[in-house]
Amino acid sequence: GENVEQHPSTLSVQEGDSAVIKCTYSDSASNYFPWYKQELGKRPQLIIDIRSNVGEKKDQRIAVTLNKTAKHFSLHITETQPEDSAVYFCAASRRGGGADGLTFGKGTHLIIQP
Amino acid sequence: EAGVVQSPRYKIIEKKQPVAFWCNPISGHNTLYWYLQNLGQGPELLIRYENEEAVDDSQLPKDRFSAERLKGVDSTLKIQPAELGDSAVYLCASSRGGATGELFFGEGSRLTVL
């Protein structure tokens, strides 16, 4: 089955700086890569996703890049703000025909220092 | 639209006791997932339903865990008997299925086994 590795486990950045979280996956058949944000005691919520037919996707201050050859993808947050503090999870799956459930990484605790 | 609803939010039981969690997915979502989330870890898939059929239960510990999704809507996850190591958050999620991708999570049911 799929295996997703996520680094770092904890990331502390100054407010206004950029943050980058990296993930690798093992199943070359995976074609869908979402990122979820989970605030303390809350449910995970989708913030951005990318499919294997594109290399980059942006949504305001967040962006995701995908390298299919190397089987890794990254989340980039620019101009970080206090409300960005949370745990971020990457995930991978095969979607569409033969779709399966998401396999999550272990998470990155992002701390925004004032 | 209403989100995924789970109950109870919190449950404390003695080991060897049974426990059950209930999930009501978003209306129209055919795919339902139960995930286990240990403290500081990413969600791990227990079982996935397409309508009323369990299409992936390979990670469900069948000696003590069971699940059902009668009529393809609500679902119940049961543990009998509970062990100390079962203490975790049990997350339910739903999606439209197919290639649409996004999983919508409930708030989770936090289980403490004493």
Image: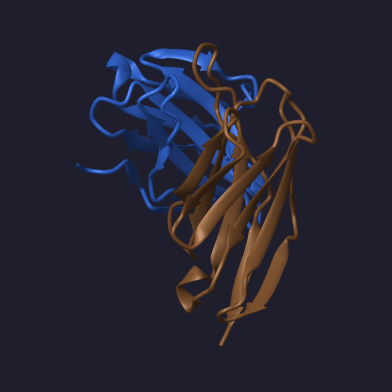
Instruction: Please provide percent x and percent y for residue A36.
Output: 51, 49
Q: Is residue B54 above or below residue B21?
A: above
Nearest to the observer: residue B35 or residue A69: A69
Instruction: Please provide percent x and percent y for residue B86.
Output: 61, 44
Residue at the bottom extreme? A114
Residue under the image location 75 percent in, 60 percent down = A8
Residue at the left extreme? B1
Nearest to the observer: residue B112 or residue B60: B60
Instruction: Please provide percent x and percent y for residue A108.
Output: 66, 59
Residue under the image location 34 percent in, 21 percent down = B30
Left or right, A52 with reference to A84: right
Residue under the image location 75 percent in, 35 percent down = A71
Residue A48 at least partly seen: yes
Residue at the right extreme? A70
Nearest to the observer: residue B61 or residue B108: B108
Q: Is residue A82 above or below residue A45?
A: below
Chain letter, colour brown: A
Check the picture and name the quadrant holding the C terminus of chain B. bottom right
Left or right, B102 with reference to A63: left
Chain letter, colour blue: B
Residue under the image location 55 percent in, 53 percent down = A63
